Image (cartoon, rainbow, N blue to C red):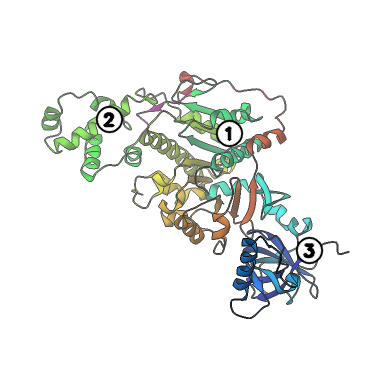
Amino acid sequence: MIANPGRGRLFGRNVLEGTFRAAPDEDLFLGELLVGVDEPTGRRYLFRIVDVTYGTEHREPGWAERVAGTMLADDARGEAGVHPLYEPGRRTYRVAECRCLGYLTADGRRFRKPKSLPTQFSRVVAPEPTDFAFLATRMGDLPVGRLRSGEAEVDFEVGIPGASLASHVGIFATTGMGKSNLMCVLAGAVMTRQGRYGLLLVDPHGEYRETLGRHPWAGERLRTYSARSLPNTSTLRLSLGELSVDDLRTAYEWSRPQEEALFELERHYGTEGLSWLATFATVEDLPGFRDVELGGRLALNTLQVVHRRARRIVELQCIATDPHVSVGGAVLRDLREGRVVLVDVSGLGSTEEVLVASYLTRRVLDEWSTAYLEDPARHDRLPVVAVVLEEAQRVLGSTKDRESNVFPRLAREGRKFKVGLCAITQQPKLVDDELLSQFNTFFILGLADEKDRNILRSSSKQDLSALGPEIQTLMPGECLVANLEAPFAVPATIHLYDEALAWTAPPPAARPLAAPNVAALVD
C-alpha cells in the first residue's frame, strides 16, 4: 500500500504553471496545496490549484453533451441508470490547473522559486508536514491563524513578523468576512509580545473595547481612551493648542477660499495651534469682524462656513480649550511602552473621528521621526508601532490633499521611522494606487467586487494574478496572507478570537492598570 496515495499525474504545462489529470471523483478545491514528486531529482514541487475542469478521452465533438442529454432523458422517464457510462474512470476525468509556487531541494532544507519542470507524468500527492517546515521561520512572531489547503485546515501556524507593521498592513474584505475578528487576533498577538510592538487603534464603532478587554494581557498591555464616560476607560481630550490647520484640512472638505480663510485667521490671532478657534467661535458680529478685524479680505459667506465649523469643533466633548490638557502625551507614553492603545471615537461624527486620528497620528510620526533624526540610540529603543485606521479609503483616496494629510505621509515615510499604517477597508479600489503600492503586507479576505480584486493583484508584493476566483470564493474567516517574508501568498484560516484567548497564557502576577483621570493627562 502506498503511504501517500496519488491525487493525479502531471502532464503539462510550463515552469510556472502545472496541469494534472485526476480521477473523475477526485475532490479538488480552489486554493488546495499539493505536491508534485519528481522521482529522478528528489525534488518536491509545491502547487496551488487555481482552476478545476472536466476532461474526457472521447474525441467525438459534442459527446459529453449527448451523454448528459441521454441521462437527462432517462431521469425524466424514471429510468436512471438504464444507459450507464462505460468505464467512466477511464473515459472521464478532472483536470486541475495549478501555479507552481516553488520546490524543495532533495535534502528538504531549502525552498526555491520555480526555475525547472518536474518530470512529465510525475505523481501529484497530498503534502506532508515536512513540506511546510521551510515556512516555519518565515511566519514571524504575530500568529493569526492556521494554514489552509482548499477547505482543509493544516496544523501549521500562520502569522507575520512584527517588524512588518512598520512597512504597512492592509486588511481588505467585504462586510461579514471577518475583518474585526482578524484585527482583534492581531491586537491580541501584539499584547503578548510584552512591549515589543505597539498599536494605535482608532475605533469608530466602539466594537473593540469589550472584546480586547477580555484578553489575558489587557490589564498590562491595553489602554483605552474614549470621549464617552465608560468604565475602566481614560478620558479622551484633545487640546486646541495642539491641533493644527492641517488636521482640519484632513478631516473636513474645504474649498480653496475656505482654506485661505483658515490661514488668514491663524495669522490674525497668532495663537498656539488652533487655540484661536475658541475665540473665533464666540464672535457674534461676523460682518463687523470681517470689515474691521480682517480688513474685508475674506468673503462673508466663506467666513460663515468656517465660523459654523469652529463652533462645532469647540463644542465637541473630546475638545479641551485648556492648552495643558490633552491625551497626546499619555498616548505617546503608552506606545513607547509597547501597548495597544484603543481610542474609542464612537459617538463622534466621521469627520471628527478623522480629526482625532489625524492629530494622534501626527504626534506619533513626529515623535518617532524626531528620535530617528536627533537621537538614533533612543530611536532604536522605541518599539515598532502601527496606526490602525478603519474605512481607510476616506483619507487615502487619490483626491485627498497629500500636502496636509498626514496619512499619505505616513504611508510614504513611516517605515524608516518604525511607524506603519494598518489600513482596513472594504473598497481598496478607492485607495490611491501609489499609496497602496507602499503596503508590504496584505490580509485579503472575501472580496466580491472584481475591481477591488484587480487593484490588489496589481499592488501586492506577491503574485496574485491567478487567484481572483479563490479570493472571490473565500468564506468568512478564510484569508490570503501576502507578506514579503513568505515566498508566496499563504492561504490561512484566521483564529476565532475567543478560541485564541483560551490558548493565551496570562502574564505572571497580572494586575489591571488604573485608568488615569483628566488631570493625569497633562503633558
Q: Is label 3 in a helix, a strand or a loop?
A: loop
Q: Which of the two marks, 1 or 2, is nearer to us in this view?
A: 2
Give the left or right position of residue 381, taking residue 454 as reference: right
- The image shows residue 133, relative to residue 184, as above or below, that is below
Locate residue 96, reporting x and y percent: 65, 67
Locate residue 19, reporting x and y percent: 66, 71
Residue that sits furthest to the right in the current view: 1
Q: Earlier in the sequence, mark 1 or mark 2?
A: 2
- 405 or 329: which is nearer to us? 405
Q: Residue at x 34, y 23 (%)?
A: 321
Q: Residue at x 47, y 41 (%)?
A: 389
- The image shows residue 232, relative to residue 90, as above or below, that is above
From the image, give the main secondary structure of the stretch colored magenta: loop
Q: Is residue 152 magenta?
A: no
Report how far apart the C-alphas of labels 1 and 2 lie in the structure.
Answer: 33 Å
Give the left or right position of residue 519, taking residue 6 as reference: left
- The image shows residue 191, relative to residue 93, as above or below, that is above
- The image shows residue 125, relative to residue 175, as above or below, that is below
* Labelled disc at residue 310: 2
* Labelled disc at residue 108: 3
Q: Mark 3 near mark 1, Cβ–Cβ under 8 Å? A: no
* Labelled disc at residue 339: 1
Picture quarter with the N terminus: bottom right
Q: Earlier in the sequence, mark 3 or mark 2?
A: 3
| Disc 2 residue type (three-letter) | Ala
| Disc 3 residue type (three-letter) | Gly
Specify the segment rendered in magenta: 235-243
- In this rendering, does residue 436 appear at all? yes
* Labelled disc at residue 174: none
- In this rendering, does residue 269 appear at all? no
Q: Is residue 238 magenta?
A: yes
